Amino acid sequence: MEYSTFKSLLRRMIVIPMVATAVLAGLLLWETFDLNKSLQWVDHTDQVLDQSGHLLMLLVDMESGTRGYIATGDEAFLHPYLEGAKISDSEFEALNRLLDDNPIQQQRLKEIHAGYGEWERYANGIIALRLAGKADPTLYENQQGKRKMDILRAQIAEFQRVEEGLRAGRVQAAHLRWGLMVTSCLGLGLGFGVFLALFTRYHVEKLGTKLLQSEERWTATLGSIGEAVIATDSEARVTFLNSVAAALTGWSPEEALTRPVGNVFKIINEKSGMNADDEVLQVLEKRQILTVANNVALITRDGREIPVEHSAAPILAGEGEVIGVVLVFRDVAERRQEQIATAEQAALLELTQDSVFVIDMEGKVLFWSRGAEAMMGYSKDEAAGTIAHDLLRTEFPQPLAEIRAELMRVGHWEGDLIKTAKDGRRIVVAGRWALQWGKRDEAPRVLVINSDITERKRGEESLVLQREQLRALAERLQSVREEDRKKVARDLHDQIGQILTSIKMDLTWVTRHLPKSEVEVLARLTESIQLINDGVKAVRTICSGLRPGVLDDLGLAAAIEWQVSEFTSRNGVPCEVSVPPVDLHLDGDRATATFRIFQECLTNVIRHAQAKSVRVALCQEDGDILLVVEDDGIGFSESSLSNSLGSLGLLGMKERAQFCGGDVHVSSSPGNGTTVTIRVPLDTPRAEREQICIS
């Protein structure tokens, strides 16, 4: 295929989907704006309904206060009425502003406001009479005030009914626009898919023909290039041999075909005379390019040795599957000597800024560069003939014998070393060792290059220290947060709870001392007492959420049982719990951390697991507290969790456990549920826990 033709085809296959996508995006954008406008109208109607409901509650509170005052003469009942009278006009004005788009509803609101004015004037009159002692406590229900308030309620109810109708119409319009948008997307996507399928099929058939022709040209090209080329299949058997490779190996293409590549391309290490590694098998296993440029000789069919440089690369199918290997090699006998002569000089000239020296296999210094003099402080005369490792008091990351074995096996070694300079300074260096072979009767030498990384190591140590400080700060923040929660929960319980209890007692006393003929007043008082009971329950719920009292009073086991009960009643998921009959003695910090981790586990079950049941077990094992939370949910892949930004909750759980010297282990797989195991030591001293977290 001509490059210009392929480029034109590629351009058409890209531009057409882009244009179709742009049209789809424009249509979706327009319909999205339209849908957003409809939703804004729905939200506006909700605001009107909320404000009208608030206004109705205000009027009801004012009426209730007035009735209470007329019935009892207690001026405390006038407080809702007086406060409502102050803000009623502003509430009407706020609702009126929301109705700027609806003159009909504004007119209804004016009528409601006028009715409120009449009722307010009547209420002021009857209150004045009660203040003067001229009103009968039973007079209020027999007068026109109740009728006026009933009219107001009916007007507001009609007002809200109209708004509910408007809201229903606007919601229906939004649903209609949403359906239109979805239908448009499906229609446009289907049409685009059909067009793209037809377009792609035509050009893929055309491209297939071109690819067959291209494969024939590829075979002809490999056969005509100046490098020797051998291709194999996935079983390392020869599938192609060009003329240059045939001349070097002594095998004709017909004879070499289907033979193991090791029989045709047989190489040895020039210095040791041993067979070299099978690069073809390495490439098939590692799926990466392998290049060998030194100390390799090709054994031809007639037994001759030819120095070669060669590389091997995998042949990949469309889906990344390795279907073979291509070997490219060349005769380098003429320039091998030049490379050996210039390699050491080039390395030394390029690396003069580092410490460079050459040693034999026993470590005796054969060459000492100016960079080594500057870094280590020893002159060339002082270093020559000495054992470098003893002179510099080198500290190795592994036994020296293992380093030498790896050096002989792969020809190089890298690692961080600690050396002592002449003036006593300890220097951390990045060491790079390269094995240099001489002739077969000469012992190999080792080129050593050391780069000073002392400052970098100090920077890494500083980062470790900062990490330790951040961990300590996080632990402190967790402690402060728990203390704040405990204080807020205690204040709510001691102050707000006592106030509500006192109000309840007062109302109960009033209920007991009122005549039984005051049926409606007694009913109102009963409702108020029930509201206070609900308020007390709400305060208890808030306090339990902030800091469960059962954790401080009864310990971790009881707190877990309480939390399981709350979890089951709130979410409807059955939860089986097993705790020891006697509470485990944990200090406050570890008990709190373990309980918070347990709460996070239950939260994750509801958010992600879709579980039908949960099992919780708390026990003591080998001096540790062991808490296991297991669900039968959908599970997940642990590898995907480690690469996800959504795993911050698990990170927080592990951090909490580390603060206590413990750990958290999560075991899960798709479709098999999830098991979280929390292990916290029973009696680890605080200083030791901090050391564990730092490590």
Image (cartoon, rainbow, N blue to C red):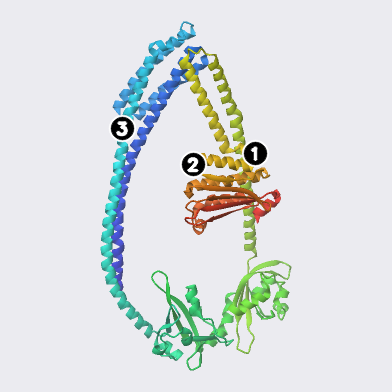
Element at badge 3? helix
Q: Which residue is mark 3?
A: 166
State which quadrant residue 169 falls in.
top left
| Amino acid on which the number 2 mark rests in the picture | Asn
Q: Residue at x 43, y 90 (%)?
A: 251
Left or right for 446, reference 243: right
Determine if residue 1 is in view. no
Residue lying furthest top in this view?
134
| Kind of element beneath mark 1 | helix
Query: Which of the numbered marks, if any, corresponds to residue 571?
Result: 2
User: Within 10 angstroms of label 2, few (less than 14), some, or many (20 or more) residues?
Assistant: few
- Residue 115 spot, x, y in % from top left: 35, 17
Please state, as top left, top right, bottom left or bottom right, where the C terminus lies in the image. Answer: bottom right
Q: Height in image: 467 above or below 307?
A: above
Front-lying residue, 61 or 93: 61
Give the amino acid type for the residue marked by disc 3 in the picture. Answer: Leu
Measured as percent of width and height from the top left, residue 437 is found at: 60, 84
Residue under numbered circle 1: 554
In the rendered picture of this protein, how many numbered marks are placed on residues? 3
The mark that comes first in sequence, 2 or 1, is: 1
Given residues 94 and 534, the one toward you in this image is 534
Question: Which numbered circle lies on residue 650?
Answer: none
Q: Is residue 450 above or below residue 177?
A: below
> Comparing marks 3 and 1, which lies closer to the viewer?
1
How far is the residue under mark 2 from the one under mark 1?
A: 25 Å
The reply to whether discs 2 and 3 touch (Cβ–Cβ < 8 Å) is no
- Left or right: 406 in relation to 520: right
Q: Viewer-nearest of labels 2 and 3? A: 2
- The amino acid type found where label 1 is placed reads Leu
Q: Earlier in the sequence, mark 2 or mark 3?
A: 3
* Contact between labelled residues 1 and 2, with CB atoms less than 8 Å apart: no
Q: Are marks 3 and 1 in contact (CB under 8 Å)?
A: no
